[in-house]
Image: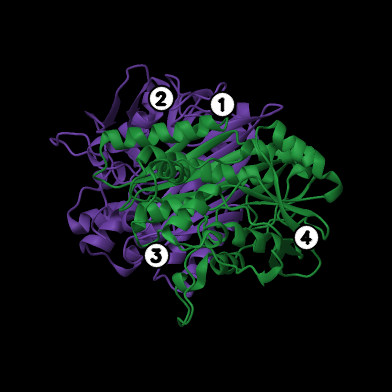
Chain colours: A purple, B green
C-alpha cells in the first residue's frame, strides 16, 4: 500500500492532491457497511465470518510497473514482491495465507519469457510463504499490473487489529529500518556505497521479506495488543497505530540498520530520515502488553526472528521521539521514494 | 475475462501474439499445484477447501480503462461493470457472492468527484448482487485499473464446473445474444440505429447484468451438468465447455436478439456474427441433463429468467451449427471489439 503523494499548497481535488488516506476515507464514505464486519475497513486485511468463530481473511493490493518496479528489479523479483507485500499484511494480523489469485495486466509487447518470469516469481513468492497460486486472469494493459488477492482463514478472536494498543504497552518492531530507502537512493539517485553495502541495500529493495513467521508467533503468544506492517514507513505506521488505538507513543530508540548508518555517513544523508520516513519495508510494528513482554520476545526468537523494544504507549495522543534527552514529534510522512523517477 | 488478440502470421513470442488462453496455460505451467484443489485452474472461479464439505470461492478480474471502458461509459458504469464481470463468473458456478475487495489504480489527474463516482459504482454493483465492498487499496497508475476480488462460500459438491457435460445433454442459454457487440459498433464505429434501438443496445454495453438469480436457480435445481459465462462470446464459451467436458455440440438455433437482427439488417451487418463472436455479455451457457430439462426450465423461470435450448451435446468433439439444414463448424473466436479503438 503506497500512499499517493499529498502536495501542499495545491488547490486540492485530484487524487494526487488527496493522498491515499483521504482517498480511502472518501471511497469508504460511499460504501454500504456489511453488518457484523469482523475487521474494520482500512485495517491491513479484510475478513468475512464463515461460522464457528472462524473468518475468511482477504487482502488485495496491486503492484504497478511505473511506481513499484525500479530500474534494476527483474520481473521475477517484481512478481515475487507483489506477493510479499500482500503476505506482509497477513503477517501483521497473524494469519497464514493459503492461496492467492492474480489479475495480471500485461503490455502487449511483453515477450513469452517475460510472462514466464512473472509466473515463476509469483510461484516463488507464494511457495516461500506456504501458499499456492490457484487462479487468475490476464488483460492487456499499457503498464505492468500485478493485482494479488490473498486468502486464508483464522479464528476471529485471534486477529490482531490496529486498534488494541493500551497505555503502558511496549512498542516493538521485528527488525532494523532504512535499508530499502537507502537502496532506492542507490538505484535511482546515484549515491555510492561499497560493494558489500550495495549488495545488502539492493537486496532489501529487490528481495523484500514478509515477517510471516514472526507475525504468526506473535499472534500465538497472545501478548500483542495491536499490529501493523511498515510498508508505508515506520513513522506512518506508528501514527496509524496510535490513531486507530486512540493512544500516543514515546519512541526512545529508533531502530536504524547499521548498514543505513554507514551509507548515510558516507553520503552525508540523514540516517534517521531514511529509517523513519522510508517505506517499502515489511517489518512489523506492534504493541505488547508489558507483563507479557518475555512471552512475545521468546515466541519471536523461537520463530527465528527478533523483537526490538523501541518505546512505550502513552495516554497522550502524540507520537514523540525522546532520544538522548531530546524530545520532538515524529512527523507523519513517508519518503516519496522513486515515484516518477523510473 | 477478455482474450488478448492472437495474431495469425506473426512470429509469436509477445503476449499479444500468444492470446489469453495460451498465456494462462503458460503461466499455469510454472505454478505448483495445490493438493486437493476443488476447482481446476482456468475454470470461471477458484476455490479453497474450508472444511465440512464447504469451499471458499474466489475470483479476481480487472477492468482497464483503455480496453474495457468505451467512450460513452461513465466511471460509475465502469466501476459497476468491474463488479458485474466478476459476479457473472460466480453466477456460472451457482455461487452467491458475499463480499468484495477492490484494488484501484487511479491516474493522478482523477478528480475527487471521479473517485466518488467510482466508489458509488462499486457499491451499486455489489449491492445489486447482495454483496458488500469490505476493503481495498489505491495506487497511482497511468490508466484506470479496477481489480475486483470476489468472495463467497459454497458446498463443494454444488459447484457447477465447465467439465461435466455428457453426450445427450441439452445445451441452453439464459438470454439472447449480440446486443453488446452491436452496441459497441454503435458507440465506436459510427453505425446507426433508431433512438429506441440505440437505447437498448447502449444499455447492454454500459449496464450489463450478471445472471446471478438464474445461476443460483440452475445450481439448486441439480439439473445442470456444466456451466460457463459468455463474457468472451457465445462461440468461445461453447468451445471452452466442449473442450473441458471432452464432448462436442450441435447447435440448432442461434439465440440472436431481435434488436440485433434489426440493427444488423439496417446496417448490412451479419447478425449471426454479432451473436456468436461478440463478447462482453454475461449470459450463462449451460448443459442440462435431458431428463431434468423441465426442472431446470421451471427453476430459471421461477427466478424471473428464461432458459433457451439451443442444441445438444454430442460424443463427436466438434462444435457444429446445424440450422435450416445447413451444417458448418462454429469458429472459435471472439469479436475483437473495441480494443485499440478507444
Most foreground residue, A284 or A161: A161
Position of residue A12 relative to residue A198, above or below, is above
Q: Which of marks 2 and 3 is in front?
A: 3
Q: Mark 3 points at which residue?
A: A107
Q: Tell me, yes or no, whether dots 2 and 1 are on the same chain.
A: yes
CA gap between label 2 and label 3 equals 39 Å
Q: Nearer the viewer, mark 1 or mark 3?
A: 3
Q: Mark 2 points at which residue?
A: A244
CA gap between label 4 and label 1 equals 46 Å
Looking at the picture, how far across and down is residue A226, in whole percent? 48, 29
Marked residue nearer the N-terminal end (2 or 3) = 3
Q: Tell me, yes or no, whether dots 3 and 4 are on the same chain.
A: no
CA gap between label 3 and label 4 equals 38 Å
Looking at the picture, how far across and down is residue B66, in whole percent? 36, 55
Which chain letter goes with mark 2? A
Q: Name the residue under label 4.
A: B313
Is A310 left or right of B246, judged from the image as shown?
A: left
Amino acid at each position: 500500500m503506497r500512499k499517493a503523494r499529498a502536495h501542499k499548497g495545491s488547490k486540492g481535488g485530484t487524487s494526487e492532491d488527496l493522498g491515499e488516506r483521504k482517498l480511502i476515507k472518501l471511497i469508504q464514505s460511499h460504501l454500504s457497511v456489511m453488518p457484523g464486519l469482523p475487521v474494520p475497513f482500512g485495517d491491513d486485511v479484510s475478513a468475512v465470518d464463515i461460522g464457528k468463530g472462524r473468518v475468511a481473511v482477504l487482502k488485495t493490493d496491486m503492484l504497478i510497473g511505473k511506481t513499484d518496479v525500479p530500474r534494476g528489479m527483474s520481473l521475477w523479483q517484481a512478481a515475487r514482491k507483489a506477493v510479499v507485500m500482500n503476505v506482509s499484511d497477513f503477517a501483521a494480523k497473524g494469519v497464514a495465507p493459503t492461496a492467492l489469485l492474480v489479475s495480471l495486466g500485461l503490455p502487449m509487447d511483453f515477450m513469452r519469457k517475460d510472462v514466464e518470469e512473472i509466473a515463476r516469481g509469483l510461484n516463488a513468492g507464494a511457495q516461500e510463504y506456504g501458499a499456492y497460486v490457484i487462479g487468475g486472469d490476464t488483460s492487456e494493459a499499457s503498464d505492468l499490473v500485478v493485482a494479488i488477492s490473498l486468502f486464508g482463514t483464522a479464528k476471529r478472536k485471534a486477529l490482531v487489529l490496529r486498534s488494541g494498543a493500551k497505555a503502558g504497552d511496549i512498542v516493538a518492531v521485528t527488525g532494523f529500518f532504512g535499508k530499502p530507502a537507502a537502496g532506492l537512493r542507490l538505484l535511482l539517485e546515484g549515491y555510492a556505497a561499497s560493494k558489500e553495502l550495495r549488495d545488502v541495500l539492493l537486496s532489501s529493495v529487490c528481495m523484500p521479506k514478509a515477517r510471516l513467521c514472526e507475525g504468526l508467533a506473535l499472534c500465538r503468544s497472545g501478548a500483542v495488543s495491536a499490529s501493523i506492517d511498515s510498508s508505508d514507513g515506520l513513522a506512518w505506521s506508528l501514527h496509524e497505530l496510535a490513531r486507530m488505538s486512540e493512544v500516543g507513543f514515546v519512541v526512545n530508540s529508533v531502530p536504524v540498520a547499521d548498514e543505513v548508518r554507514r551509507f548515510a555517513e558516507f553520503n552525508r544523508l540523514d540516517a534517521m530520515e531514511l529509517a523513519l520516513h522510508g517505506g517499502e519495508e515489511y517489518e512489523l510494528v506492534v504493541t505488547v502488553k508489558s507483563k507479557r513482554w518475555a512471552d512475545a520476545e521468546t515466541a519471536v526468537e523461537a520463530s527465528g526472528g527478533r523483537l526490538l523494544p523501541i518505546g512505550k504507549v502513552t495516554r497522550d495522543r502524540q507520537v514523540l521521539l525522546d532520544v538522548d534527552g531530546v524530545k520532538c514529534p515524529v512527523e507523519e510522512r513517508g519518503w516519496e521514494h522513486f515515484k516518477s523517477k523510473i
